[in-house]
Amino acid sequence: MGDTTYDAVVVGAGPNGLVAANHLVDAGWSVLLLEAQPDAGGAVRSADDVHEGYVHDTFSSFYPLALASPVIGHLHLEDHGLRWQHAPAVLGHRTPDGRWALLHRDRTVTAAIVDELHPGDGEAWLDLCAAWDKIGDDLVGALMTPFPPVRHGAALLARLRSAGGLDLVRLLLTPAADVGRQLFGGVGPGLLIAGNAAHADIPLDATGSGLMGILMTMLGQTVGFPVPEGGAGELAGAMARRFTSLGGELRTSTEVTSIEVSSGRAVAVRTAGGERFAARRAVLADVLASRLYGGLVDVEDLPGQTVKAMKRFQLDPGTVKVDWALDAPVPWSTPPPYAPGTVHVGDSVTELAEASGQIAAGAVPAKPFLLVGQMTTSDPTRSPIGTEALWAYTHVPQRVGYDAGDDGLRGTWDHDERERFANRMQARIEALAPGFGDRIRARRVLGPHELQARDANLEGGAINGGTSALHQQLVFRPIPGNGRAETPVHGLYLASASAHPGGGVHGAPGMNAARAAVAHARADPRVRAGWWPGRRR
Ligand SMILES: Cc1cc2nc3c(=O)[nH]c(=O)nc-3n(C[C@H](O)[C@H](O)[C@H](O)COP(=O)(O)OP(=O)(O)OC[C@H]3O[C@@H](n4cnc5c(N)ncnc54)[C@H](O)[C@@H]3O)c2cc1C
């Protein structure tokens, strides 16, 4: 055996690949982590490439899921340089009458704000928080472990009774567009919940969206929407530093082009540069499922059923992201009482639902729902004092049928279409903050092609490794009958957001894959001994 044999090879250094690689070195394995891009991090990276002196997160920014995740917590990344920062308020949504629905980390402050918008809503807010206190930890635990979640599932069932019983279950199954109406008299809390649901691509009038909205809102309430000091890349950097400090080997600018299978087992990977790295025990793929089963593993090495089922694998919608370097903060016409890190832009829950319906129907939304990040407000190190590093993103259909707006966009997302759509997005901010455009020093627009060029998992600008809709969740993720990290190839594990429980920076798919690999190696004496009765091709 030469130096190019490892216990495990991990393909892709996104957050899931990094979590998996860390867990495997913790288990005492020799691990090689291969990353196609020049830097580790996947969709967790940042750079000063929009304007000098400004750090912009290239993709993701806010990490409530990472802070709530036992998997990432277990890595103690603070010991490797990570420092979290919080904006004065977590999240804001300006109501049409010019007031702000705000989520503050102090629940009594949030309650006071929503109560001022509509008397009585403060108490209803605190009731929702109290129910969450009883089930939140187990719900998060159940989501982050392989399906079925035996331990957390049982604990959750036991606690549900005291948290509201069937009424609470019903609420969690209610579509996001209706949750606010059912619990509150005013529009503020419903806007916060519906906007949070729109972070995933489940239509707001479908079951599953309410659970997503409540989950993200209550995480915002309990852990905040933290950001890494210095940029998203600092989170990935801390994971990479931990991994290499424990003896793991990370190679960037190294694209894996195939996974070699022998006698039904993954035994090695090959790179675009012609190198071959053998894996004694496991290959873990932090790779989009359609790419893993659609090129990396030879179709001859896959059961026909898998190949057939993958034809129905559904990506989530595409994304257009705009980054701005501003020479002053956003001039909101009515400033919020506490400056939020995240801002949602949409006139009403009905409008949000309309935009999500348009995307599902193949239309470019006329009034796109914007997720906005005020990054210097969240972390003062992101740009010079008195300025703002800002971004906004929104979703567009993977296949555009028509433009519900006036620009006749066809979904080519070439330079011209990107700029025109970015103008549509910018106009939404300008309407709430007159004079916004005058504060722009630089603007960068990343469309579906640019996102994919920077991270192959973001195919067509899909940010979640496949739709989060119910028909592709749990045992249906990525294809029916799966729901776990194991693949039809022995020793090969799906470790990306295409695996249960899906997108977001929480590390669960990576951890599930690493745990499965370690458990199988322990159980199988041939793997434990680093021997498998296959021949190298
Ligand atoms: C614009 C945007 C905003 C987002 N905002 C948030 C947010 O605020 N909070 C949040 O929690 N989540 C957010 N997300 C989602 C989150 O970033 C992803 O769900 C998460 O990064 C998925 O992690 P991953 O490790 O599965 O994949 P990725 O992060 O996509 O990483 C995959 C890595 O594998 C590499 N790779 C792929 N194929 C190969 C190959 N053949 N050889 C070698 N390397 C390969 C890629 O280059 C990449 O580095 C956002 C995503 C985007 C795009």
Image (cartoon, rainbow, N blue to C red):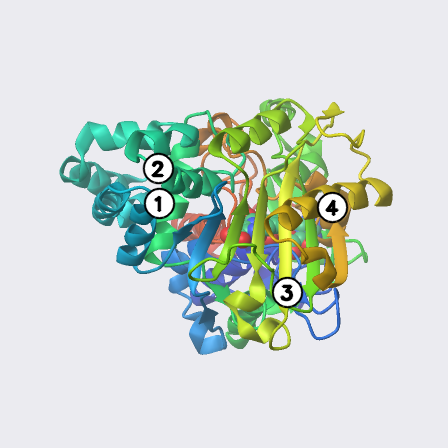
Marks 3/4: CA distance? Answer: 16 Å
Question: Badge 3 local density, few (<14 within 10 Å), some, or many (20+)?
Answer: many
What mark, if any, has residue 389 been given in the picture? 3
Marks 1/4: CA distance? Answer: 32 Å
Query: Mark 4 — residue?
Result: 422
Q: Is residue 431 above or below residue 300?
A: below
Query: Mark 1 — residue?
Result: 117
Asked if residue 102 lies left or right of residue 431, the reply is: left
* Nearer mark to the viewer, of 3 and 2: 2
Query: Mark 2 — residue?
Result: 186
Q: Secondary structure at mark 1?
A: helix
* Nearer mark to the viewer, of 4 and 2: 2
Say which of 229 and 93 sits in front: 93
Q: Residue at x 21, y 36 (%)?
A: 157
Q: Earlier in the sequence, mark 1 or mark 4?
A: 1
Is mark 3 in CB contact (under 8 Å) with mark 4? no
Say which of 356 and 499 sits in front: 356
Q: Earlier in the sequence, mark 3 or mark 2?
A: 2
Q: Estimate the x, y position of residue 259 in percent, counting from the top left.
A: 68, 46
Q: Earlier in the sequence, mark 3 or mark 4?
A: 3
Name the amino acid type tagged 3. Ala
